Amino acid sequence: MNIKPIILLLACSIASPAFATTPDQMTTCSLKAELYASAAKMRDENQTPQDAAKFLGAYKGKYISADDFKNVINTVYFDDRFANAGGFALQKQMLDYCLNGPPPALQPLE
């Protein structure tokens, strides 16, 4: 399988004017999405939020503030909507949300 065309396609889609994300925004969102997935993994392994905060502390810095970091840990551990969320699916959803905002409101079928 030749992956060069796929990489080229991805590079072109990222460079297109329709893709209005800055490199810093992409970095921030990617790191934040990784943090959500990593925190969920630690939660699922029965680690405490305090242990997760210590172990994942390297995520804090230029792209993720201390307040955002704390919010992610607390959300993953204590928000019931995240109780069964984890892995790559959570990471992808959080990346999409960070880059694009909430999905449009769904409408019932008529």
Image: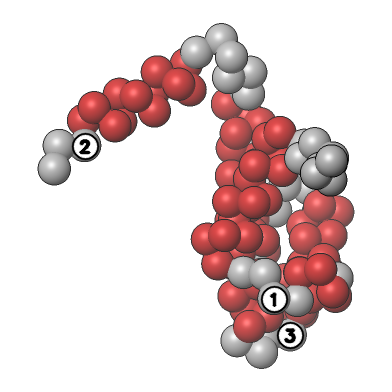
Disc 2 to disc 3, C-alpha distance: 41 Å
Q: How is the image coloured?
A: secondary structure
Q: Would you name the residue on which mark 1 appears?
A: 84
Q: Which mark is residue 48?
A: 3
| Quadrant location, the C terminus | top right
Comparing 86 with 48, the one in front is: 86
Q: Is residue 63 above or below residue 93?
A: above
Q: Would you name the residue on which mark 2 appears?
A: 3
- Residue 46 coordinates in the image, percent (x, y): 66, 89
Comparing 31 with 50, the one in front is: 31
- Between label 3 and label 1, give the one nearer the viewer: 1
What element does badge 3 sit on?
Answer: loop
Which residue is at 80% across, 36% downward?
104
Q: Quadrant of residue 85?
A: bottom right
Q: Is residue 45 above or below residue 79?
A: below
Position of 11 with respect to 102 (left or right) is left
- Between label 2 and label 3, give the one nearer the viewer: 2
Which residue is at 84% across, 74% downward?
80
Q: Are marks 3 and 1 in contact (CB under 8 Å)?
A: no
Q: Are marks 1 and 2 in contact (CB under 8 Å)?
A: no
Position of 78 with respect to 48 (left or right) is right
Q: Which mark is residue 25?
A: none
